[in-house]
Image (cartoon, grey):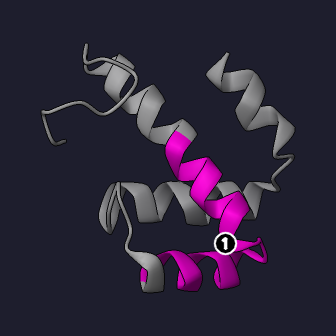
């Protein structure tokens, strides 16, 4: 399901690289300002960027053996 949702965003290789780099090096949960800067760098809307991070976080949690939705345990 998550990969299908990710594919629907129809991102370029450059956009994916910027998003992945920020996810790995900056924050899995960027604040509003950071999200806005990432969106601007990618040429995406803030909503699209936020959606990507939500999907990517769910994938990361599942890979770590955690529930897909954020619960009481912070990652």
Instruction: Locate residue 30, reporting x and y percent.
Output: 38, 68
Q: Is residue 64 above or below residue 27?
A: above
- Principal secondary structure, stretch drawn in magenta: helix
**Residue lying furthest left:** 73
Residue name at image x 58 percent, y 66 percent: 18
Residue name at image x 45 percent, y 30 percent: 58
Question: 62 or 14: which is nearer to us?
Answer: 62
The magenta segment is 34-54
- What is the secondary structure assignment of the residue under circle 1? helix
Would you call the spot at circle 1 few (<14 residues within 10 Å), some (14-19), or many (20 or more)? Answer: some
Q: Which residue is mark 1?
A: 46
In the picture, measured across the screen, residue 62 lies left or right of residue 74, that is: right
Q: Is residue 9 above or below residue 32?
A: above
In the picture, measured across the screen, residue 22 lies left or right of residue 19, that is: left
Instruction: Locate residue 1, reporting x and y percent.
Output: 67, 15
Instruction: Locate residue 73, reporting x and y percent.
Output: 12, 33
């Amino acid at each position: 399901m998550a990969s299908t949702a990710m594919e629907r965003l129809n991102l370029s290789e450059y956009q994916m690289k910027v998003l992945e780099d920020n996810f790995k090096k900056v924050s899995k949960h960027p604040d509003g300002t950071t999200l806005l800067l990432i969106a601007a760098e990618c040429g995406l809307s803030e909503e699209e960027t936020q959606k990507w991070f939500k999907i990517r976080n769910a994938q990361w949690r599942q890979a770590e053996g955690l529930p897909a939705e954020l619960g009481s345990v912070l990652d």
